[in-house]
Amino acid sequence: MLNYSLTQLGAALRAKKISSVELTQLYLDRIAAHNPVLNAYLTVDAKTSLTQAAAADALLAQGRALPLTGIPIAQKDIFCAKGWRTTCGSKMLSDFIAPYDAHVVEQFNKAGAINLGKTNMDEFAMGSSNETSYFGPVKNPWNHNAVPGGSSGGAASAVAARLCAAATGTDTGGSIRQPAALCGITGIKPTYGTVSRYGMIAFASSLDQAGPMAKSAEDCALMLNVMAGFDERDSTSLLREKEDYTRDLNRPLQGLRIGLPREFFAEGLSNDVAGRVQDAIAEYKKLGAVVIDISLPNSNLAVPVYYVLAPAEASSNLSRFDGVRYGYRAPEYTDLADMYEKSRAQGFGEEVKRRIMIGTYVLSHGYYDAYYLQAQKIRRLIAQDFTDAFKQCDVIMGPTSPSTAFNLGDKGDDPVQMYLSDIYTIAVNLAGLPGMSIPCGFGDPGANGPAMPAGLQIIGNYFDEARMLNAAHQYQLATDWHSKQPNGI
Ligand code: GLN
């Protein structure tokens, strides 16, 4: 049952082959067994989850179940969930109990899904390896010496290790797609504005977007059906008609035009990942797709632009953590200013402080024009590159990450190396486009580690999630990389 799709789980629940309480208990037992090693969950509250499961069983008994009713889902610890500790991976919020539900959490509650727990993440979603979490790193279930990716590393590890049926993540510069690639699962970052950011702790508001992480594209489509939708409490939430993201899953791919940006296959991409991506493209050709050579000429500027804009927004968003209303307060201080300073100095980790300092700097008088404004202009050019490319193709494909999972500690001392792990994902956030990652095979085995999963990135045009999911699902019907699972799990 651990490898069942969400549709199969729903059917098993409706057919009374298993109850939601039993299914929830099954995952809770797995978490108890594996989480001490993986550290994928920060908070588990068996009683609350089982109470929700009992309520779901009542709905199932009455024949009032929706597609995800009774199915246990893990929530990234960036989403406020009423009554649940919500830390965002930070000491700053280590004791924070959320007084309300994020829109995403509310949507899953309405769907009758079970909140199985809160997953570990990089502090305030800043990172690509889950190593900046105040609560310690997450292990990659394929190799415990390797990182799971970040910032949604706990979610990716939990899905890959079958410690939940599916999970939520957020993606500001790659935080759904990159960990999905490194853990061998499927994850989608929707078009900006598709999923409400209400109750999702803000990192860089113009880039942050929530999305699902699951075993397959089909499962992601069902999850997105629950997560997407207008919410007036988020001013960037889009007022659009509700879509069924599963509607095109079964369309044949004959004639699909795949754009391959030459900039994505240049220096910096490891040979093994390049090979697996080329294998995947060959499979798409067999399925009837045609390949078109495209160019995204400004894509080399995406990382520098992001590391001006994201810290700028973060420095503003994180100013609310001042030790006054909620969050960590230093135990000793002399006056108000000293309390702010000590609380922030002690409550935030190194990477968060680095971003706040950079952000404050690029927004300061005299540097605003030179950095922030310039970065905004280049952001526009990056988005324009995609608009031009989509005149020639239906989807864009390439690697998700330049390499397979690296080892814990390998990049911890070198922020720039860490930042480069998102070189293929960041431009998508800057443009506000949808993107996803699907498993496409395994890289070369390391000197003393097993072969690790590689991810294929699929980028769609605005609001074209259904087509991306279609492309992903057809590939997953033709191959079985998405159903591989780590040893000993
Ligand atoms: N790794 C990138 C960063 O550190 C992106 C993180 C994210 O998408 N939340 O900012």
Image (cartoon, rainbow, N blue to C red):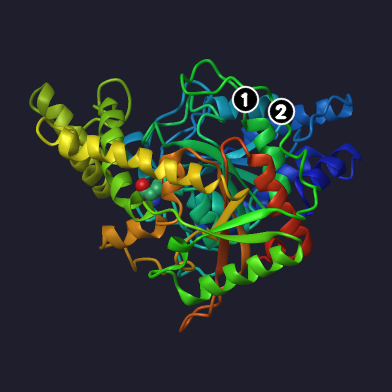
Quadrant position of the C terminus in the picture: bottom right
Residue 393 in the image: x percent, y percent? Answer: 60, 50
Q: Is residue 488 visible?
A: no
Residue 50 in the image: x percent, y percent? Answer: 69, 35
Q: Label 1 near label 2: C-beta < 8 Å?
A: no
**Which residue is identified by label 2?**
111
Q: Is residue 241 above or below residue 389?
A: above
Q: Which residue is most to the bottom?
A: 447
- What amino acid is labelled 1 in the image? Gly
Q: Earlier in the sequence, mark 2 or mark 1?
A: 2
- Mark seen at residue 229: 1
Q: Residue at x 47, y 37 (%)?
A: 432
Q: Residue at x 62, y 30 (%)?
A: 228
Q: Is residue 371 above or below residue 148?
A: above
In the image, is 286 to the left or to the right of 147? right
Quadrant position of the N terminus in the picture: bottom right
Foreground tag (2 vs 1):
1
- What amino acid is labelled 2 in the image? Ala
